[in-house]
Image (tube, rainbow, N blue to C red):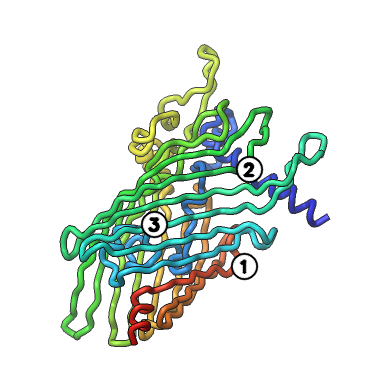
Amino acid sequence: MIKLFKQRALLVIIVLIIALVKLSYSQSGQTSALLGDKLNTITTAVPFLMVAPDSRAGAMGDAGVSTTPDINSQHWNPAKYAFIEKDMGFSLSYSPWLRALVNDISLAYLSGYKRIDDNSTISASLLFFSLGEIVFKDADNQSRGTFTPNELAIDVAYSRKFSKHLSMAVAGRYIYSNLTQGQFVGGAATHAGNSVAADVALYYQKEFRWKSGVKGQWALGANISNIGAKISYSENVESDFIPTNLRIGPSFTLDLDDYNRLTFTFDLNKLLVPTPPIWSFDSIKNEYVVLPGNGKDPRVGIVTGMIQSFYDAPGGFKEEMQEINIAVGMEYWYDKQFAIRAGYFHENKYKGNRKFFTLGAGFKYNVFGLDFAYLIPVDQRNPLENTLRFTLLFDFDAFRAQDTQ
């Protein structure tokens, strides 16, 4: 009985993913009804690209665009790698997904970097989302076989210093999403979705010293990620936007003394994809259209969609502001060996209502480091609640130093 429930639940999840992707562009009266309650969530294809993959940022409220450079900067801001102190490193992260329901859905992340010279660094990562095993069934409840839907993203980045304070980076990404394994959905044949995308990132940091003797640094980061082609799962439907996102924010780090370091960080996020409008049926044209004052038609190109995303909300400026997510985080290090972290993430209740607190810790010993993160949801359930995420870090510089002793 439990196994049957699991199979059906996972099938429902896949169908919902595809349905939600199309909701933004559905020409029906449902959108208008939802806007009557001011609920107007922006949905995109491959939303797994926006999940925090590592435990450091995951413990700081999903904030990381301007934090001190680390091995997992690839996801948050690859420009930070230009200022990383070590020569080479890699990490492996694992996040259970929907653990309260099933035990075989997870997000895995492999990230690494290598310094080319004093000014340049290359980096790469692999993000893999597995939906476990699913038994597909037809309308007569007959099995069509067992499948393992999955999604992945592979990217490579190059970062470079342009001054002792400023760096920039570009990244290229290949995205693969195979949710239906070629099954027929709604009578239409489906296929895996493919896309390519790019990131453009900026990072600025500057050290300071107060008269009291306390020193530290402040930093500002910005990253426009997933600028890329739309994705489709069937030839019979319109392609959908991937989650192009603007992330920007400052951080402030204090070196209280030789043993104690404290960091505060703040991120703002906004999806650069069209907001769903209010559709109205035009009896003359015999189709649904967007009337003036009801938003903008989302059936536009990638660049137009990015620009339009700043002024296309049906609710005007107020709704545009509701589309900005806020992430705040804190990190404390003792002797560069032990860290505790906390954070909070806020999304407007009319734009998805994701609100959660995060906690975490980090340990560093010679060659290896280990980070943990735990999420506490507010108002509504979260796929990552009641799960412990972890990241294993490997420092090649420490390994070489140990090897030469």
Q: Is residue 187 above or below residue 34?
A: above
| Circle 1 residues within 10 Å: few <14, some 14–19, many ≥20 | some
Which badge, 3 or 2, comes first in the chain's sequence? 2
Instruction: Judge by depth and name the residue closer to the eye, 131 or 211.
Output: 131
SS under mark 1: loop
> In this picture, is 346 found above or below 286?
below
> What quarter of the picture does the N terminus occupy?
bottom right
Q: Residues within 10 Å of mark 2 (few under 14, many from 20)?
A: few
Q: Earlier in the sequence, mark 1 or mark 2?
A: 2
Residue type at mark 2 is Leu
| SS assignment at label 2 | helix
Where residue 330 appears, as percent x and y from the top left, is 40, 72
Q: Amino acid at mark 3?
A: Ala
Residue 69 picture location, percent across and down: 32, 67
Name the residue that disc number 3 marks.
124
Q: Are marks 1 and 3 in contact (CB under 8 Å)?
A: no
> In this figure, what is the number of numbered marks?
3
Residue 163 is at least partly visible in this image: yes
Q: Quadrant of residue 100?
A: bottom right
Q: Quadrant of the C terminus?
A: bottom left
- Residue 158 at what x, y percent from top left? 29, 54
Give the camera-side residue of 73 and 305: 73
- What whole-number distance in Å separates the C-alpha atoms at marks 1 and 3? 30 Å
331 up-or-down from 282: above or below: below
Rendered image: mark on residue 386: 1
Q: Is mark 1 in CB contact (under 8 Å) with mark 2?
A: no
**Disc nearer the start of the sequence (1/3):** 3
Q: Residue at x 41, y 58 (%)?
A: 326
Q: Say which mark, if any, is on residue 16.
A: 2
Which x, y percent locates residue 66?
A: 32, 63
